[in-house]
Image (cartoon, helix red, strand yellow):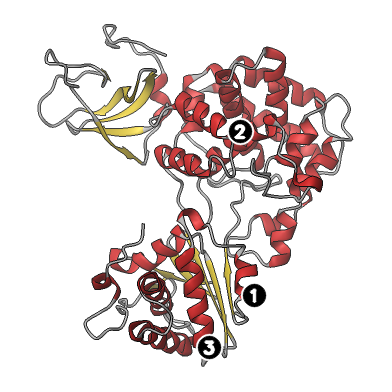
């Protein structure tokens, strides 16, 4: 949440603080101006507009500073484009690495508003900049504007500023090297499912008919083995540092959908149909140009429109495939529709998506949030759960979100955590009535001399009734194979309480 105190907004002379110089990633060539004064000036102006009306002297001072920063760029070029990708600012594709926490503040605030790309044209006026700041100051959490940004900008007469949001792409289609492929997968069935998924989707990429037999074999593997495996679930539920191919993303969404379907009490036939629909929900992306799917910067209006066509393309592909469940094309069409009737594509009557589409949408959103993207770091599991909760009601079905979050817990299998005793462990079981106190497998024994137990039940209490331990934070699993903690070992503490 942005700090709205005036002392944080203005420097001593009444101007927004000037950031230290950002460090160019590749110095030595014709480098553009440092973008941080523009970003800091805009976010300072947004904070001021939360406190003061347009025309107030401190707002005017901030506008002067922002326009001065913009003139440094627009005096050299007709346009200025700044993209925020993985915490760094890119000017016309040229990256500036942001190293200090102080300089990260405007980046963080813009990302909180889901503004990832800013376009300014020469001649932009103070009135336009003031209107932009006004729009952003009215935005709620997670980028909820008073109306669609493009419409709001046009309605307020803003012609020389455009704000963009980078579409969260799930995928890279096609057969080529995958340098950021997941490693450390200890579950052979999950590994096999990824290979089978690639084989099943490849005919579509090559313009050939779908191999329904290959899809059926893959679904059998997912429903009978992968969804039963703690090691596989840990790989899917925890933070992922690789950017998914579509087949990997689709396998993960299918497994997560099965988890939700079981929790909500679907019968075996419905679970089978659900797994198929979830596995094939994104096949429409085979018709999207690979350069658009892989683009790390902001999408143009045309590119965004292309991306938003993939649900219709998917339904068109699937409706021609004999032998699929009747709802599979429907889920492909509706998985980006919102429960309140918005989303895309636009459908006649603005109808609410089918319940199965709503279920896949929750799994799809969680899997996308916890996976790395070219423009942002992955969300931690508990962060993803909180985002799902904020989306419930307007975009996602609240009952399905509740069922999913209550099933996986705030510390799902495979999450790396630290206890209040300094112990680092991997969550290997969750306790139904103790969601904040999972069973963990130790990675490092605490420094206070506790016995070197392999596994610890954090829900244990002392004789006085207090918890012996608390999980205090989630950690990124850097250089750690979480899957090996799900392999049974001879020194397991058999006295630990095992609750599924």
State the count of labels: 3
Looking at the picture, tell me which residue is in the foreground, 72 or 384: 384
* For discs 1 and 2, the disc positioned in front in the rendered view: 1
Q: CA distance from mark 2 to mark 3?
A: 46 Å
Asked whether disc 2 touches disc 3, contact meaning CB atoms under 8 Å apart, the reply is: no
Q: Mark 2 highlights which residue?
A: 253
Side (left or right) of 147 relative to 327? left
Where does the N terminus fall, quadrant-wise? bottom left
Res. 118 visible in picture: yes
Q: CA distance from mark 1 to mark 2?
A: 38 Å
**Relative to 93, does residue 331 appear above or below in the rendering?**
above
- Mark 1 or 2, nearer chain start: 1
- Mark 1 or 3, nearer chain start: 3
Q: Position of residue 186 (x, y in %)?
A: 48, 25
Q: Position of residue 177 (x, y in %)?
A: 62, 47
**Relative to 46, does residue 326 appear above or below in the rendering?**
above
Report which quarter residue 18 is drawn in.
bottom left
Q: Mark 3 highlights which residue?
A: 125
Report which quarter residue 364 is drawn in.
top right
Asked whether disc 1 touches disc 2, contact meaning CB atoms under 8 Å apart, the reply is: no
**Residue at image coords 58%, 34%:** 363
Say the numbered circle drawn on residue 78. Answer: none
- Mark 2 or 3, nearer chain start: 3
**Relative to 361, does residue 29 appear above or below in the rendering?**
below
Where does the C terminus fall, quadrant-wise? top left
Q: Residues within 10 Å of mark 2 (few under 14, many from 20)?
A: many
Q: CA distance from mark 1 to mark 3?
A: 14 Å
> Which secondary structure, mark 1?
helix
Q: Mark 1 highlights which residue?
A: 154
């Amino acid at each position: 949440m942005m700090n709205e105190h005036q002392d944080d907004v203005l420097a001593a002379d009444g101007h927004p603080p000037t950031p230290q110089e950002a460090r160019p990633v590749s110095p030595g060539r014709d480098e553009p101006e440092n973008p941080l004064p523009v970003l800091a000036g805009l976010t300072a102006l947004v904070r001021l507009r939360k406190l003061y009306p347009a025309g107030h002297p401190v707002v005017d001072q901030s506008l002067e500073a922002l326009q001065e920063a913009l003139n440094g760029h627009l005096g050299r070029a007709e346009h200025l484009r700044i993209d925020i990708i993985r915490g760094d600012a890119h000017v016309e594709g040229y990256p500036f690495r942001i190293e200090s926490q102080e300089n990260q503040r405007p980046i963080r605030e813009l990302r909180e508003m889901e503004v990832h790309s800013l376009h300014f044209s020469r001649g932009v006026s103070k009135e336009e900049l003031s209107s932009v700041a006004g729009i952003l100051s009215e935005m709620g959490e997670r980028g909820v504007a008073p109306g669609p940004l493009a419409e709001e900008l046009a309605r307020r007469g803003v012609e020389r500023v455009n704000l963009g949001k980078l579409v969260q792409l799930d995928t890279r289609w096609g057969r080529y090297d995958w340098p950021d492929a997941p490693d450390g997968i200890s579950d052979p069935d999950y590994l096999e499912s990824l290979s089978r998924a690639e084989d099943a989707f490849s005919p579509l990429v090559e313009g050939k008919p779908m191999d329904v037999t290959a899809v059926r074999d893959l679904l059998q593997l997912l429903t009978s083995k992968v969804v039963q495996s703690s090691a596989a679930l840990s790989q899917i539920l925890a933070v992922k540092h690789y950017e998914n191919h579509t087949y990997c993303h689709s396998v993960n969404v299918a497994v997560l959908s099965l988890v939700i379907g079981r929790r909500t009490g679907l019968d075996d036939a419905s679970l089978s149909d659900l797994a198929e629909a979830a596995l094939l929900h994104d096949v429409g992306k085979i018709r999207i140009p690979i350069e658009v799917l892989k683009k790390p910067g902001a999408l143009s209006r045309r590119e965004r429109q292309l991306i938003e066509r993939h649900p219709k393309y998917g339904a068109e592909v699937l409706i021609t495939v004999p032998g699929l469940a009747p709802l599979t094309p429907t889920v492909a069409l509706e998985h980006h529709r919102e429960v309140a009737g918005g989303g895309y594509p636009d459908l006649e009557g603005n109808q609410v998506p089918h319940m199965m589409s709503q279920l896949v949408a929750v799994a799809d959103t969680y899997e996308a949030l916890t996976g790395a993207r070219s423009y942002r770091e992955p969300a931690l599991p508990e962060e993803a759960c909180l985002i799902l909760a904020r989306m419930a009601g307007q975009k996602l079905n609240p009952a399905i979100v509740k069922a999913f979050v209550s099933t996986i817990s705030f510390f799902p299998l495979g999450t790396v955590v630290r206890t209040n005793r300094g112990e680092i462990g991997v969550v290997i079981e969750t306790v139904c009535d103790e969601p904040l106190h999972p069973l963990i497998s130790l990675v490092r024994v605490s420094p206070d001399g506790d016995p070197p137990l392999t596994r610890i039940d954090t829900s244990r209490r002392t004789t006085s009734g207090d918890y012996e331990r608390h999980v205090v934070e989630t950690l990124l699993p850097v250089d750690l194979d979480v899957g090996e903690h799900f392999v049974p070992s001879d020194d397991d503490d058999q006295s630990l309480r095992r609750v599924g």
